Amino acid sequence: MHRFSFLFVCCLISTPVFSQTIINWDILSDVAFSDKYSEEVEAYYYFPTFGPSVLALKNKEVIIKGYVLEIDRGNDVYILSANPFAACFFCGGAGPESIVELKLGKNHPRLTMDQVVTFKGILKLNAVDIYQCNYILENAMVFR
């Protein structure tokens, strides 16, 4: 019985359910953008083609550190950025690959502009919804 329990625990530990991948912003830069026209908004937008290292992370639990950007605190809209606000994608200092939209739970800690935080969550890749970021961290929570 003892041996069976040990083998069972070893199997659980090695399954993907318990695995987390620490990523950095260089990994998320494995994406190419092309201009694509949207009839809905009558404008061009950056259409992403994700590279192999990013595709390998799709729907996986990841851990990433960055700067918090408060987009709309009242509606819990936050972005994690590779750069502080003054140098982020919106201010011309980087591209769309340098931000991740955070989908936080209701009881998250208070977050402030340019606070450096490490988050854990499920990485979703978005190439179709122009109203969301290309990278979305679902079930995002502060890590450590």
Image (cartoon, rainbow, N blue to C red):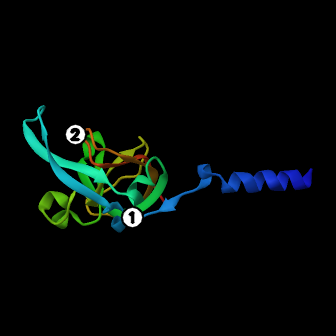
Circle 2 residues within 10 Å: few <14, some 14–19, many ≥20: few
Q: Is residue 141 among the parts visible in the rendering?
A: no
| Residue of label 1 | 65
Q: Nearer the viewer, residue 50 or 9?
A: 50
SS at circle 2: loop
Is residue 60 positioned above or below 30 on the image?
A: above
Is residue 104 positioned above or below 38 on the image?
A: below
What residue is drawn where x is 54% and y is 57%?
20
What residue is drawn where x is 75% and y is 57%?
10
**Given the current orientation, which residue lies at the most extreme top position?**
40
What residue is drawn where x is 37% and y is 64%?
27
Residue 82 location (% of width, % of height): 29, 65
SS at circle 1: strand
| Residue of label 2 | 131
Residue type at tag 2: Tyr
**Given the current orientation, which residue lies at the most extreme left position?**
42
Cα distance, mark 1 to mark 2? Answer: 23 Å
Residue type at tag 1: Lys
